[in-house]
Image (cartoon, rainbow, N blue to C red):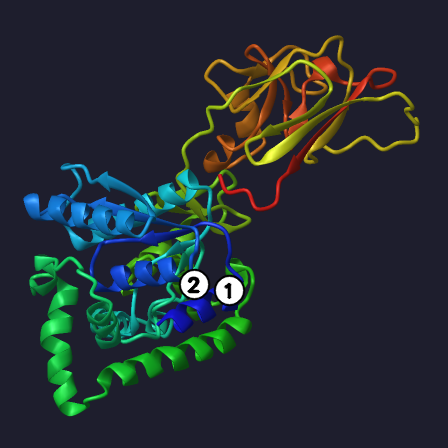
Amino acid sequence: MIEVVKNFIEKYNLSGTFIVAFSGGYDSMCLLDVMHKLELNTVAVHLNHNWRGEESFNEAKNCENFAKSKGIQYYCEILSDSTAKTETAAREARYDFFKRCAKKFNTDIVFTAHNFDDNAETVLYRIIKGTGTKGLTGICAHRDIFYRPLLTVKREDIENYCKENNLNPNCDSSNTDTKYKRNFIRHKIIPLLEEINPKVKESLYSLSDIAGEDNKIIDKYLPQNIFSADKSEKKRIIYNILAENDIDYDREKIENILNFIEENKNSKSGKTISVAKDLWLFVNNKKAELVKKEDKCTEVLKVTKEGEYAFGNGIFKLKSVKNYDNKTDFPKDCENKAYVCLDEVNFELRTRRDGDFIAPMGCEGTQKLKKYLNEKKIAKHEKDKIVFLCKGSEVLWAIGHGISDKIKVVNKPTHMLIFEERNGYES
């Protein structure tokens, strides 16, 4: 077991802080114990769903005690009573929690303890619901910040590891409740299938492996632009978008999205359709992309002198211009740099606010920032991401979109403004 996890970490070249999604069950307790033996910098995070009253709190306490006994940092949150008590809602809440933990502990590595049997059950569940070849690939060993080092390990081997190492996992009573679809598959359907084929789990795992290889070949020949694709190719592209973001889908959902794209492919400003919690598909006359709801940046950074300033996902630079060459080309509005004339340096870097205004280049007077951005056909979900250089409510530079007429160069510039994105930053 230790070698399996060690080899997985080496395969993906992982280092730093490892978050382990820790329910306290056999799988996650086995994984956390292995992480301890490998002497890795680990944080165990537990989300108490608060569905089973005292039992849920006892499980959380058992998790805390185990983590402390191994000298592992432990973090727990309790799910709000207002959260819907459904499998889908619980899953979304867990993954939201894991992503918050990744930011809290400044890491991009979250280990979940899905195993070989989980993958087989997932493939079968998708077949029953109706899926394409994309869905047959099952659970991915790695997607985004999530890694699953035990995906090749059978549940039986994990349980044996726990017994051999005298571990005392939580026994969640809901895991045997067949009113939940996945439990019904695990406890009812798979045992029946094993009467036909005792190695049905291995067969399902093999199917997911073959489907994964086939998908690579199919995707290789897909058009890069969804608008140049025919209907079957568009479906495939949509399947990919949803599957890659772990979003449940069926034929009706795919058809609805297809129709939405057709209806809005000529829209200049763009339209959005919800595809999952906090996820929308944005479509305009240039592209179709998945966008995530993100908390608006409320940071305000004072700029009072020349130099470099870290802000959001980038670095803002204010430089004086001493040796200006008249032959130098001015940056275009769409670039993240600009030559300007400044009388003084006393500004703020921030995102937009109600009441903001700008004096557009070449125009008399000022204009509400909202109207200015609308005229530039900037998508709604992009507006809150734009960084502005402001003086009070007046915008002097909408970074990447244009400067104010008030700081334009008349004879020669006094300063140069630059905004560079930082690699590896996740907002």
Q: Quadrant of residue 153?
A: bottom left
At a point 9% along the width and 75% down the height, the residue shown is 188
Q: Is residue 215 above or below residue 350?
A: below
Going from N to C along the chain, the mark reached first, 1 or 2, is 1
Give the amino acid at mark 1: Tyr
Q: Position of residue 145 (x, y in %)?
A: 44, 53
Residue under numbered circle 1 = 12
| Residue 276 in view here | no
Q: Read off the residue under disc 2.
A: 142
Contact check, label 1 and label 2, Cβ < 8 Å? yes
Along the line of sight, the residue nearer the viewer: 350 or 238: 350
Outermost bottom residue: 196
Is residue 360 shown above or below 316?
above
Q: Which mark is residue 152?
A: none
Please tell me which residue is depicted at 21% across the width and 62% down the height of the picture. Answer: 167
Image location of residue 136, percent across then percent down: 33, 74
Crowding around mark 2 (Cα neighbors within 10 Å: few <14, some 14 to 19, many 20+) is some
Quadrant of the drawing holding the N terminus: bottom left
CA gap between label 1 and label 2 equals 9 Å
SS at mark 1 in the image = loop
Q: Is residue 139 left or right of residue 183?
A: right
343 versus 115 height, above or below: above
Front-most of 68 and 185? 68
Q: Position of residue 348 (x, y in %)?
A: 59, 17
Left or right? Give the position of 11 relative to 173.
right
Determine crowd level at label 1: few under 14, some 14-19, many 20+ residues with C-alpha closer than 10 A: few
Q: Is residue 314 visible?
A: yes
Q: Residue at x 38, y 69 (%)?
A: 2
Q: Residue 330, relative to residue 52: is it above or below?
A: above
- The residue type indicated by label 2 comes to His
